[in-house]
Image: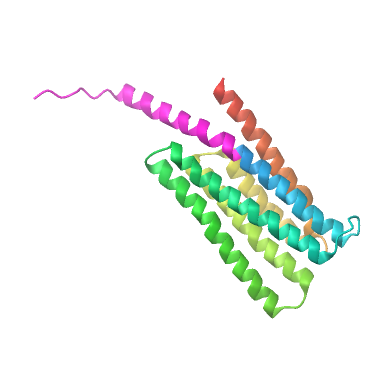
Amino acid sequence: MDSETFDPRQALRIAAETEDRAGRTLQPRVALQYLIWGTAWLIGYGSLHGATHNWLPLSSSTALILFSIVVVLGVASSALLSITVSRGIRGESAFQGAVYGWTWMLAFAVVFFAASRIGSISTDQAFNGMIINALAILVVGMMYMSGGALWRDVPMLALGIWFLLVDIVSLIAGPTGFITVFLILGVGGFYAAALVTFLQQRRRAR
């Protein structure tokens, strides 16, 4: 009974080609995800900052509603992009992408429920906003660190670490300064990661 001879070099080549194909599928979408989140934060935190410091003709409630809308859209886009990546990839990578996407949704569902509970207990809106945002950014930082570990994506890992550090800085800045911290350091981190990931993708394509 004949059997094909196992060629370890061919197996390694196939594995490398599969990993490279997965990277080409994933990286453009990750760069787009960073761009979407950076824009969402620019609009959301920019609106809150403008309403708080009176450089935009918005009431605090209107700015908060706008912020909530763009965050929900950002979370939805992250989940959908992560889930749809798995459609072009099979096996373990597909499972990882799907679980990663659903984890975004579930983690932020917990944040939203926690926000409602915090709001019902404390009447200090500035303090509540700081704590709720700190919880949300904790999720963002941990998710990006997890994604970086799953896909060996150094920019994603670095972005996760960056956001955890930004979160600490925002808590040090306090209820009056955390919005400024997220507006400057958060938006800048997303746009920088989008640029780095896009350039990596172009080098990979060459």
Does the image show residue 62? Answer: yes
Q: Report the label total.
A: 0
- Say whether residue 164 is magenta: no
Q: x, y (%) of residue 75?
A: 61, 53
Q: Answer left or right for 105 relative to 194.
A: left
- For the N terminus, the image quarter is top left
Q: Is residue 64 left or right of residue 10?
A: right
Residue drawn at x 46%, y 29% as measured from the top left: 21
Q: Quadrant of residue 125?
A: bottom right
**Residue 153, percent across and down?**
54, 39
Q: Please name whichever residue, 33 or 155, is drawn nearer the observer in this view of the structure.
A: 33
- Residue most toward the top? 206
Q: Name the residue nearer the viewer: 63 or 143.
A: 63
Q: Is residue 67 above or below residue 1?
A: below
What residue sits 63% from the left and 39% below the top?
A: 32
Residue in view at x 57 percent, y 66 percent: 110
Whether residue 174 is visible, yes or no, is no
Q: Position of residue 184 (x, y in %)?
A: 79, 48
Residue 24 is a magenta residue: yes
- Tell me which secondary structure the magenta stretch mostly adopts: helix
List x then y, in percent, for residue 195. Answer: 68, 34
Magenta range is 1-30
